[in-house]
Image (spheres, rainbow, N blue to C red):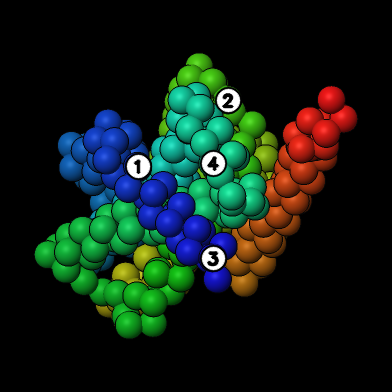
C-alpha cells in the first residue's frame, strides 16, 4: 500500500514537471503544428488533386467529401507521428533528472528503482494520451466543419489505433532514453526522431511515392503499420461514401494504394489484421525489453549497494 502511494506520487511529480516546462511542452507540439501549417499552406490542394486523379473522366463528387478526405488523411498523419515524437519529448523528464542529479534523490529515498522506472513510463503514457486526445479533438472539429463521414465504429477504432500508437511510442522512447545521460545526446535524439520518424513511417509522404526498394524496406519497420492502421480507420468512412456516390472499385483501390491504406511488401498485400498483428507484436516485444531493463537495472543496483557499517560493533571493539 505504501509503495502504491509512492508510485502515484512519482507519477504526479513527473507529470507536473513536464507541464511546468513551457519550452518542453511547446517542443512536443512542434510536429503536429508543422503538419497543420504545411497542410493549410499548400498540401491540402495537392491531396485533393491526387484524389481527383484517380477519378474517371467527368466524375463529379461533393467538395465536402473531398475536403473531409484530405483532412482525414492529415489527421492520420498527425496522430501516428506525434504519438512517437511527443512521447520522446515528454520523456525528456527522465534525462533532465539524470542531468540535474534529481534521480540521486530518488535512489536514496525508501523507494525501489522498479517503482521509479514504472512511474516514468506510466507518466509518459498519461501525458502523451492527454496531448493526443486534444489533438484528436481538434482534428474531429475540423472534419465536422469541412465534411464529416466517420461512422461510430470508425470513431472508436480511431481511438483504439491512437492508443496503440501511443503505447508503442511510450515504450520506444522509454527504452531509448534510458541510455541517454547528457544534454548533447538528448538534443541529438530529439532532433533525429522529430526529423526522421515522419518520413520512415510514411506520415509526411505516402510510402507508395518512394522507390520499390525503399517501399519494401519501410514495410519491414513497425512504424509503417502504425501509420497505415490510422489511415484505414480515418479514411474508411470517406472511401465508403465515395463508393456509394458511384466511384468505381478500381478508383477506390488506386486511392488506397496511393495513400498507404494498402501496404505492399515484396509484392504482397498486408491485410489490416496482419498490420495489427505486426504492430502489436512489436509493441509486446518492446514491453518485454522494458521489463527486462527494469529487472536487470534493479538487480545491478541491489548488487552494488554497499553493506552498511555497524558503528555500534566498531565502537565496542575499540
Q: Earlier in the sequence, mark 3 or mark 1?
A: 3
Say which of marks 3 and 2 sits in front: 3
Front position in the image: 205 or 13: 13
Q: Earlier in the sequence, mark 4 or mark 1?
A: 1
Classify 10 Å Cα crowding around label 1: few (below 14), some (14-19), many (20 and above).
some
Q: Position of residue 58 (x, y in %)?
A: 23, 62
Q: Secondary structure at mark 2?
A: loop
The residue positioned 60% from the left and 40% from the top of the image is 107
Q: Earlier in the sequence, mark 3 or mark 2?
A: 3
> Which corner quadrant of the image does residue 287 belong to?
bottom right
Cβ–Cβ below 8 Å for labels 4 and 3?
no
Residue beneath label 2, please?
181
Residue beneath label 1, please?
17
The residue positioned 56% from the left and 44% from the top of the image is 109
Q: Position of residue 309 (x, y in %)?
A: 78, 34
Q: Position of residue 160 (x, y in %)?
A: 46, 70
Residue beneath label 3, please?
2
Mark 2 to mark 1 CA distance (whole Å): 18 Å
Front position in the image: 161 or 86: 86
Taking the view exactly as shown, the residue that stands out farthest to the top is 184
Up-down relation of residue 193 to residue 71 (above or below): above
Up-down relation of residue 184 to residue 20 (above or below): above
Residue beneath label 4, please?
106
Mark 2 to mark 4 CA distance (whole Å): 16 Å
Amino acid at each position: 500500500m505504501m509503495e502504491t502511494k509512492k508510485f502515484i506520487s512519482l507519477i504526479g511529480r513527473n507529470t507536473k514537471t513536464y507541464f511546468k516546462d513551457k519550452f518542453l511542452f511547446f517542443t512536443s507540439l512542434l510536429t503536429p503544428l508543422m503538419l497543420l501549417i504545411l497542410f493549410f499552406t499548400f498540401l491540402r490542394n495537392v491531396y485533393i488533386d491526387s484524389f481527383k486523379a484517380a477519378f474517371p473522366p467527368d466524375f463529379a463528387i461533393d467538395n465536402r467529401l473531398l475536403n473531409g478526405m484530405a483532412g482525414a488523411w492529415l489527421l492520420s498523419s498527425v496522430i501516428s507521428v506525434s504519438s512517437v515524437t511527443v512521447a520522446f519529448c515528454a520523456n525528456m523528464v527522465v534525462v533532465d533528472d539524470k542531468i540535474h542529479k534529481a534521480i540521486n534523490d530518488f535512489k536514496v529515498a525508501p523507494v525501489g528503482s522498479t517503482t521509479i522506472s514504472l512511474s516514468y513510463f506510466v507518466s509518459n503514457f498519461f501525458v502523451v494520451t492527454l496531448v493526443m486526445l486534444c489533438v484528436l479533438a481538434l482534428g474531429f472539429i475540423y472534419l465536422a466543419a469541412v465534411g464529416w463521414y466517420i461512422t461510430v465504429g470508425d470513431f472508436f477504432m480511431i481511438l483504439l489505433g491512437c492508443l496503440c500508437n501511443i503505447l508503442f511510442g511510450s515504450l520506444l522512447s522509454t527504452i531509448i532514453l534510458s541510455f541517454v545521460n547528457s544534454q548533447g545526446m538528448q538534443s541529438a535524439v530529439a532532433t533525429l526522431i522529430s526529423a526522421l520518424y515522419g518520413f520512415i513511417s510514411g506520415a509526411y509522404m505516402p510510402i507508395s511515392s518512394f522507390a520499390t526498394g525503399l517501399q519494401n524496406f519501410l514495410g519491414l519497420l513497425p512504424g509503417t503499420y502504425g501509420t497505415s492502421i490510422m489511415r484505414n480507420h480515418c479514411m474508411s468512412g470517406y472511401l465508403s461514401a465515395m463508393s456509394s456516390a458511384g466511384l468505381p472499385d478500381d478508383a477506390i483501390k488506386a486511392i488506397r494504394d496511393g495513400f498507404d491504406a494498402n501496404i505492399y511488401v515484396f509484392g504482397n498485400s498486408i491485410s489490416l489484421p496482419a498490420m495489427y498483428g505486426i504492430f502489436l507484436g512489436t509493441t509486446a516485444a518492446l514491453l518485454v525489453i522494458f521489463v527486462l531493463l527494469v529487472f536487470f537495472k534493479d538487480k545491478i543496483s541491489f548488487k552494488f549497494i554497499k553493506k552498511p557499517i555497524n558503528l555500534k560493533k566498531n565502537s565496542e571493539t575499540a
